[in-house]
Image: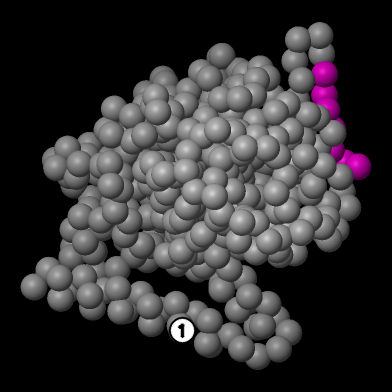
């Protein structure tokens, strides 16, 4: 019975995808809306699910290197600013909407590439399967890292990754030589992107080196209203600020330290969701809508009969509440189940908050200190939900 119910739900979501893309086929403004929704659906989540080891494989590379065509964001490269003091350096660079996420341009061994700015995954990954205007053309840049290839899984794609080493630059600032991944083969599971700038720093022993582990980046900021992304080698959240403390996701089985925190209140369609198990929320800039761990998703759906709106309250360091919300009028607010292979749902539930919850303000991550701050047009929790 449960299998039949899940099949009906998946079929309904597939019909919703078709409806979103087929009801907007006229020209002009409606056509642009179709393109936006199409991108949102196809790049809904790049949250990292894990990877396993594969034997070393000698795969030929047939691509040739060309530069990425200039975009408005790339043309604004002159706007990239490196702010320095005697001990602090901050890189400010333009980011721009792409495939339902936000992307940034960077240089790898002299070649220009683009990738999704993703706080839900740990690695720098380039697309080695095709040459595209969207992500760039990988032509064998870098050198072999002597690490075996792995099979990497994300919520919207999975595939075989070869690990190489090369020099990387963001803006005019070199971050030195890093180990990066090259997708040799990609299987889409609802997404349309294979190029990621993973921004999760800490990982379990045995996991391939994360991008930020190989740099001195200690903090980062997403300024969504101004389409600006910043990285710094010093904390960016003032010590006196009442920030949100990051919970170490490795305690609930994750291979990496995702940016998650404990949920105090989860409200769906105006109804508070009760759970005997702890609920954690992941802040993921590489996701557009809302992902809910598989069993919890279907439990909520049976009670709520759909997802019209959602509010998530999390506790700050001083025991206040910070609210994040999204609703159906926002085309980014699409809700799907996801199965985390490392999560034991008899002990905890996990939800993933994407751009629908995040894009109205400025979010700062103090990576090393494990603190997150929100500024801007984020809702205040109702007074009766205070501690």
The image shows residue 291 at horizontal and vertical percentages of 37, 55
Is residue 134 visible to the viewer in this orientation of the structure? no
Comparing 341 with 185, the one in front is 185
Describe residue 54's horizontal placement relative to residue 363 as left or right.
left
Query: What span is in magenta?
Result: 78-84
Comparing 159 with 230, the one in front is 159
The image shows residue 198 at horizontal and vertical percentages of 56, 40
The image shows residue 348 at horizontal and vertical percentages of 22, 39
> Quadrant of the image for the N terminus?
bottom left
**Outermost residue, right side:** 78
> Residue 384 appears in which quarter of the rendering?
top left
Please say if 371 is above or below 41. Answer: above
Residue at the location (51% across, 34% down)?
A: 147
Q: Mark 1 = which residue?
A: 19
Task: Provide the secondary structure element on which disc 1 rests.
Answer: helix
Q: Is residue 356 magenta?
A: no
Residue at the location (29% across, 53% down)?
A: 339
Describe residue 381's horizontal placement relative to residue 124 as left or right.
left
């Amino acid at each position: 019975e449960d299998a039949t119910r899940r099949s009906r739900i998946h079929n309904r979501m597939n019909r919703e995808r078709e409806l979103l893309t087929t009801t907007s086929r006229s020209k002009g403004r409606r056509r642009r809306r179709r393109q936006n929704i199409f991108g949102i659906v196809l790049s809904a989540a790049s949250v990292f699910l894990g990877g396993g080891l594969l034997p070393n494989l000698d795969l030929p590379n047939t691509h040739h290197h060309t530069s990425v065509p200039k975009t408005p964001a790339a043309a604004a490269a002159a706007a990239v600013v490196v702010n320095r003091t005697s001990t602090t350096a901050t890189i400010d660079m333009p980011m721009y909407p792409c495939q339902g996420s936000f992307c940034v341009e960077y240089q790898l061994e002299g070649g220009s590439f683009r990738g999704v700015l993703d706080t839900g995954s740990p690695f720098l990954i380039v697309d080695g399967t095709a040459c595209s205007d969207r992500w760039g053309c990988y032509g064998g840049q870098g050198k072999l890292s002597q690490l075996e290839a792995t099979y990497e899984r994300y919520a919207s794609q999975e595939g075989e990754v070869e690990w190489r080493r090369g020099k990387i630059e963001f803006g005019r600032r070199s971050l030195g030589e890093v180990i990066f991944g090259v997708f040799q083969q990609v299987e889409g599971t609802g997404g349309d992107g294979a190029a990621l700038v993973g921004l999760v720093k800490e990982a379990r022993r045995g996991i391939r080196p994360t991008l930020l582990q190989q740099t001195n980046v200690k903090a980062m900021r997403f300024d969504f209203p101004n389409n600006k992304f910043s990285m710094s080698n010093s904390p960016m959240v003032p010590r006196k600020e009442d920030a949100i403390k990051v919970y170490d996701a490795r305690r609930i089985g994750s291979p990496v330290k995702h940016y998650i925190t404990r949920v105090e209140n989860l409200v769906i369609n105006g109804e508070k969701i009760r759970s005997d198990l702890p609920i954690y929320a992941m802040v993921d800039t590489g996701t557009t809508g809302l992902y809910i761990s598989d069993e919890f998703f279907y439990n909520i759906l049976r009670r709520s009969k759909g997802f019209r709106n959602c509010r998530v309250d999390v506790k700050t360091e001083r025991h206040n509440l910070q609210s994040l919300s999204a609703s159906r009028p926002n085309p980014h607010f699409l809700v799907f189940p996801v199965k985390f292979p490392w999560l034991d749902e008899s002990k905890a539930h996990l939800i993933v908050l994407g751009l629908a919850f995040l894009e109205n303000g400025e979010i700062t991550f103090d990576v090393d200190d494990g603190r997150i701050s929100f500024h801007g047009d984020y809702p205040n929790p109702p007074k009766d939900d205070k501690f």
